[in-house]
Image: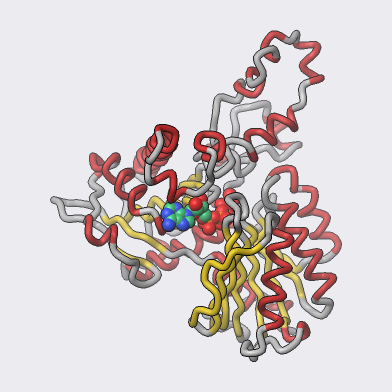
Amino acid sequence: MKVILSINAGSSSVKISVYAASHHKATPREIADAQVSGLTAPPAKLTYNRQGASVEKGKEVDASSQDTAFRLLLDTLINDEALKDISSKDDIAIACHRIVHGGDYDDAQLITKDTYHHIEALSDLAPLHNGAALGIVDACINQLPSTHNVACFDSQYHQSIPAHIATYPINQDIAKKNKLRKYGFHGLSYAFIARSTAEFLHKDESSLNIIALHLGSGASACAIQNGKSRDTSMGLTPLAGLPGATRSGSVDPSLVFHYASDVGKLSPASTSQLHISRAEEILNKKSGWSALTGTTDFAAIASRATPEQALAFDLFVDRVAAFIGSYFVSLGGDVDALVFAGGIGEKSWQLRDAVVQKVQCLGFRVDEGKNKGPLKGVVDDISGDGDGSKKVLVCQTDEQFEMARMCATKEELWR
Ligand SMILES: Nc1ncnc2c1ncn2[C@@H]1O[C@H](COP(=O)(O)OP(=O)(O)O)[C@@H](O)[C@H]1O
Ligand SMILES: CC(=O)OP(=O)(O)O
Ligand SMILES: [Mg+2]
């Protein structure tokens, strides 16, 4: 039996789950979970559960970066005397880290100097994530010297996307040389969603076809065919596709050159002076809900209390519905379920209601009572009645569990 710390650095949160795991047992047992959420909507809040019982719920804390949030969470776990499985730092055998951009990696990796530098080199392609996650890896290397660190990649699940979908129509020599293609992210979540949904529907995962939506601080959609990713809305970086808390999502790429009023008038010769990195920063960190409404709290946006919030809400519904329509066609109409997940997908009944109404023409309906009621279990059916209506589900996704599960079967960790 080994203690695994499973660390998920999202763009607005850090979530840690602690597991007791045995080699090859596919279901690590959860001992505790702790998270700091709301990093982009201060004050950040700490929630901590031990053995399924609540210890802290929404306690306001002073944390504005993933790094400070992690240190606070690690202290919380190590200083809790009632958490018997971690009486000292040495009890933590494995720390697994959610690394959003894994480039061509198709399997979790033990973090060595080589893998560390490789992940570091990919940081520009996930500007809100890889650097922050590596900051946490550094903290683990320094503070937990006897712990093995493992990188689990969000991009891994999307290795199955066919070439004609992953390819950008640009010069292919340059595309290959610079590895410019659709990678896709939220893959740990989609892997969890696919397995849990198949179990819920009593289907073999290899014959499962669903449209899955991971809607959190970063949001994406995924067309899952025969249990594998066929298409997803994020691309080379997590900026593409749906808008998010501080991200624009897809815009006309030329917008970058017209963002400042005088930029469009520059001659081609002077465009080398343009600060593309500044444009990237604006689209990643200063756009999305924050730019439209002044808040990244989606519960406030879903209240539609101001015209700006109503605009942001309607815009999101429009973009999400467009991906559902596209993926419905991509799956040839053979769709077992539409599945909502992520902070917004799991918690905002208003968003689910509005999205499903928009795609009613495809046969999706929600039951009002089930949609508004508390969620029961990992997967919950909120479908409404209707002739030939298709299933609508909510999945309480668990990226930390997915990582711990990967570690339980990784031979080199158990030798
Ligand atoms: N009750 C709620 N209603 C609507 N949205 C919510 C609610 N609680 C949290 N959210 C939203 O969920 C998002 C965070 O989701 P999460 O998946 O935890 O994000 P991440 O992993 O990207 O940090 C935030 O935009 C937050 O506003
Ligand atoms: C990939 C991504 O955007 O992740 P998150 O939603 O956790 O920020
Ligand atoms: Mg997340």
Q: Nearer the viewer, residue 274 or 159?
A: 274
Task: Give the colour scheme of this rendering.
Answer: secondary structure
Q: In this rendering, is residue 166 above or below 99?
A: above
Q: Position of residue 386 (x, y in %)?
A: 15, 51
Q: Residue at x 61, y 86 (%)?
A: 22
Q: Nearer the viewer, residue 230 or 343?
A: 343
Q: Position of residue 178 (x, y in %)?
A: 75, 37
On the rendered structure, is 415 left or right of 45? right
Image quarter hosting the C terminus: bottom right
Q: Residue at x 84, y 60 (%)?
A: 114
Number of numbered discs overlaid on the protein picture: 0
Q: Position of residue 353 (x, y in %)?
A: 30, 48
Q: In this rendering, is residue 149 above or below 181?
A: below
Image quarter hosting the N terminus: bottom right
Q: Is residue 227 visible?
A: yes
Q: Is residue 154 visible?
A: no
Q: Position of residue 31 (x, y in %)?
A: 57, 83
Q: Residue at x 40, y 58 (%)?
A: 347
Q: In this rendering, is residue 379 above or below 256?
A: below
Q: Residue at x 54, y 50 (%)?
A: 217
On the rendered structure, is 336 left or right of 101? left
Residue 209 picture quarter:
bottom left
Residue 413 picture quarter:
bottom right
On the rendered structure, is 326 left or right of 66? left
Q: Nearer the viewer, residue 47 or 334?
A: 47
